[in-house]
Image (spheres, rainbow, N blue to C red):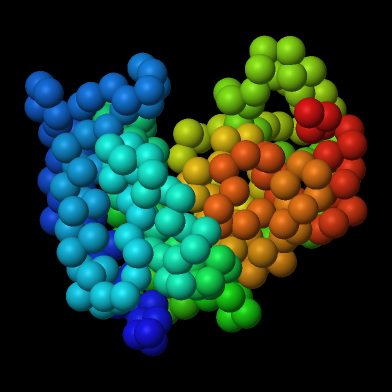
Amino acid sequence: MAELDIAALANLLQEAAYTEIMPRFRNLGDGDVRMKSEAIDVVTEADEAAERLIRARVAEILPDAVFIGEEAVAADPSILDKIADAELAVIVDPIDGTFNFAAGLPLFGVMMSVVKAGETVAGIIFDPLGNDWAIAEKGSGAWLCKPDGSQEQMFMRPSQPLAQMIGIANTGFFDIDTRRRILSNLADVRLFTSYRCAAHEYRILCQGHMDFAMYNKLMPWDHLAGTLMVQEAGAHAARFDGSPYLPHHTSGGLLIAADEDAWQELRDKIFTV
C-alpha cells in the first residue's frame, strides 16, 4: 500500500478548485445546475468536473485506493457499500455547499477523507476563496495550512455554560415533530445557525469560534474529514446514542462538543431526539 502523501492530496484539491470550480463560480450557464433529490439538493457542472479531476489524480497518488465521490454515488448508490470493507478508501465531496455555490454565495469547500481498514486516518478541507487548507491526520492534531506555507494548530475552545453556547444545528432531516421539539429546546442556547456547508462549519469549530455542531443525515463525504478534524482539535464527537461515528455510518446522528460533559448536557437538554 502506498504511503499517505497528505501534501499531494491537499494540492490536488487546490488544483481541482482553480481548474474546474472557481472559473465557474458566478458563471454557471443555463443547464449547468440540476436538481437531485429536491430543490435544495443540486449538482453543477463544476461538481462533476472537479470530481473527475480529483479521481484521476487520486489514481496516480494512491492507485490501490477505492475512490468514493459524492457524484459517483449519486449515479450508483452501491458504491457507498465499499467503504466498510475497503483496505484503503478516498472519499471526496468535490463541492461541499453546492447550494451556496450555485447561488453565488462564497461559502463552499472541497473535502477529502482517507479511510484505512474502517478508520478515518486523514481529512482535508480546502477553501477555494481563502486558498488555505484545514488538515488533520490521526494522532497529529488539526492544522490550518496557509498559502505562504505557514501552519497554525487549531483547537476547540473550552466549553461554555449552556446559555452562552453558540453552534450549528442542522434540523432539516428530522421528522416534523422531532424538529419542533429540538427547535424549541434550542431557545436555551445563545445562538444557533446552519451555513449549509459542513466544510466551513467544521473549520470554524476547529478554530474555536463555536461550541457545538449537530447533524442528523450522515453522508461520509460530508462528515468524515470534519469529525476527525474536530477530534484532533480536542472535541468530543459521537452519535446520539453515545457510540463512535464510523466511516460506514449513514444514520444515528452526530453531536460534537468541546468535551464529554458538554456533549452530555447538549444531548440531554437540547437534542432530545
Give the percent coordinates (x, y) of residue 23.
13, 46
Image quadrant containing the N terminus: bottom left
The residue at the point 62 percent across, 79 percent down is 139
In the picture shown, does residue 133 fall above or below 48? below
Give the percent coordinates (x, y) of residue 181.
79, 18
Badge count = 0
Q: Is residue 81 visible?
A: yes
In the picture shown, does residue 65 fall above or below 53? below
The residue at the point 18 percent across, 64 percent down is 56
Would you say 19 lies left or right of 195 here? left
Give the percent coordinates (x, y) of residue 29.
10, 27
Image quadrant containing the C terminus: top right
In the picture shown, does residue 52 fall above or below 176? below
Q: Quadrant of residue 229?
A: bottom right
Would you say 273 lies left or right of 54 here? right
In the picture shown, does residue 34 fall above or below 209? above
Q: Quadrant of residue 235?
A: bottom right
Which is more toward the observer, 153 or 102? Answer: 102
Q: Quadrant of residue 47?
A: top left
The residue at the point 56 percent across, 66 percent down is 118
Which is more toward the observer, 84 or 208? Answer: 84
Would you say 259 lies left or right of 111 here? right
Would you say 129 lies left or right of 123 here? left
